[in-house]
Image (cartoon, rainbow, N blue to C red):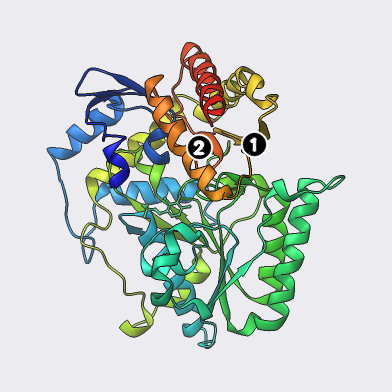
């Protein structure tokens, strides 16, 4: 709060396309999709029309004992996108709740299957899965976690090596780093598989820790280990799903399906809170019983809200009608080319890209407090970007772009040019 004494809040009055406008008439290119949720721009006419139509039919009805067309249609569309490997959807309203659901469901499924000792979870170094107490136990970002450490059941969570490709030493490939990380996981499973319910992974890009990218072979290796040691795999695709990494689901690039897949953020096009957990027939059957105690009891008041589901259906329709994944491939290549001066900049390291995510690390003076330098850098960068009509918020010394999928060529060139200008100004000043 105190930082806002020097960096006042921006009061947004309206949005259009990739741009946000403030009450003083200034505009900002939303290059991080309003925290990774917005896919097709603000005030998108097609999503707006779907919501206006839905508003006159049904704003909400509870999803216990009742159902409605938008939630059924959305579940069927998502199931088809997994070729029915994950044919069941469980709904909630935010990402952290989806993570809670996946963790609870994994534990409960093992208990129903006669393995009640499987109570522990595995997460990756630097992982972020949300900030409710359960999700925070599988989050390894000190900034979010430290204050609440005493409240978390940390003894039941194992943090294993991240496959972050930036760790590659001379001569090592990203796949080598990934295989090495998987070996470390196997060492843990050899010891504790009987106590472990699931491993939770953000496939391909660990976003909140600073866009740490890894080779898809990691997911294949972990998938094989999970089969061998009887561990569920949870993929948190809350940030990386919905086309962000180039395929609709990130895990398609490794050709593996998990036992549980969490979606939120982009699924409603950035319009309304909606999250869901997809799972397999096998898991569904473990809960299918006349005994209510063997069922999965978890509910939120707004579970499966019809307005949010309609926004999601309109979002999925745009993917189909506009061939979004194909077009993103072409657009991504253009933006990558435009960013070449940054990729080659001598104060930049680890320039990386996957799908519609670009990131690079600023080379900062180590000084006597590297963390402090990084947070000063990110605050300065944010403030300087605003002066250049850009909304960008680095994570420490990592600058990233995660724009909506609707930038035209001129906006992409503008984004690349201004990002370079902001970077040079901030680096000159630090
Ligand atoms: C944002 C995010 C969450 C949490 O979602 P909320 O809706 O903010 O609770 C969980 N996991 C990942 C990977 C995320 O990016």
Vertical comparison of 411 with 175: above or below: above
Question: Between residues 289 and 52, which one lies in front from this camera angle?
Answer: 52
* Crowd rating for badge 2 (residues with CA inside 10 Å; few <14, some 14–19, many 20+): many
Vertical comparison of 86 with 14: above or below: below
Compare marks 1 and 2 and give the one earlier in the sequence. 1
In-image side of 257 versus 20 (left or right) = right
> What is the count of numbered marks?
2
* Outermost right residue: 171
* Outermost front residue: 368
| Residue behind mark 1 | 363
C-alpha separation, residue under disc 1 versus residue under disc 2: 10 Å
Q: Position of residue 407 (x, y in %)?
A: 45, 20
Taking the spot 59% from the left edge, 34% from the top edge, the residue there is: 355
In-image side of 206 versus 169 (left or right) = left
| Residue behind mark 2 | 377
Question: Between residues 247 and 415, which one lies in front from this camera angle?
Answer: 415
Q: Position of residue 273 (x, y in %)?
A: 29, 48
């Amino acid at each position: 709060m105190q930082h806002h004494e020097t960096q006042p809040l921006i009061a947004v009055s309206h949005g259009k396309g990739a741009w946000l406008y403030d009450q003083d008439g200034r505009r900002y290119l939303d290059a991080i999709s309003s925290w990774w949720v917005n896919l097709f721009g603000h005030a998108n006419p097609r999503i707006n029309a779907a919501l206006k139509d839905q508003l006159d039919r049904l704003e909400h009805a509870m999803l216990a004992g009742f159902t409605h067309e938008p939630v059924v249609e959305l579940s069927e569309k998502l199931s088809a996108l997994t070729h029915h490997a994950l044919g069941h959807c469980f709904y909630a309203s935010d990402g952290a709740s989806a993570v809670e659901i996946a963790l609870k469901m994994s534990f409960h499924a093992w208990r129903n299957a006669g393995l009640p000792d499987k109570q522990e979870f595995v997460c990756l170094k630097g992982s972020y899965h949300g900030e409710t107490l359960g999700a925070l136990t599988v989050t390894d970002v000190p900034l979010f976690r430290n204050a609440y450490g005493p409240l978390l059941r940390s003894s039941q969570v194992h943090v294993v090596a991240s496959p972050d490709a930036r760790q590659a030493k001379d001569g090592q490939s990203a796949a080598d780093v990934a295989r090495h990380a998987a070996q470390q996981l196997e060492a843990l499973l050899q010891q504790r598989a009987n106590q472990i319910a699931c491993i939770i992974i953000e496939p391909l890009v660990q976003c909140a820790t600073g866009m740490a990218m890894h080779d898809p072979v990691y997911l294949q290796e972990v998938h094989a280990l999970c089969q061998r040691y009887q561990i569920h795999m949870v993929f948190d695709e809350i940030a990386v799903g919905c086309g962000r990494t180039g395929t609709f689901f990130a895990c398609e690039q490794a050709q593996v399906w998990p036992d549980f897949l969490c979606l939120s953020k982009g699924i409603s096009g950035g319009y309304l809170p909606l999250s869901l957990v997809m799972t397999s027939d096998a898991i569904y059957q473990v809960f299918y019983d006349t005994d209510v105690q063997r069922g999965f009891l978890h509910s939120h008041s707004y579970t499966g809200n019809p307005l949010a589901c309609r926004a999601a259906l309109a979002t999925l329709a745009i993917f189909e009608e506009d061939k979004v994944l194909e077009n993103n491939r072409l657009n991504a290549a253009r933006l990558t080319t435009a960013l070449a001066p940054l990729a080659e900049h001598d104060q930049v390291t680890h320039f990386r890209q996957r799908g519609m995510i670009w990131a690079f690390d600023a080379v900062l003076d180590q000084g006597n407090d590297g963390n402090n330098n990084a947070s000063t850098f990110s605050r300065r960068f944010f403030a300087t970007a605003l002066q250049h009509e850009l909304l960008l918020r680095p994570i420490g010394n990592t600058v990233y772009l995660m724009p909506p999928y609707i930038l035209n060529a001129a906006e992409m060139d503008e984004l690349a040019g201004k990002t370079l200008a902001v970077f040079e100004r901030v680096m000159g000043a630090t």
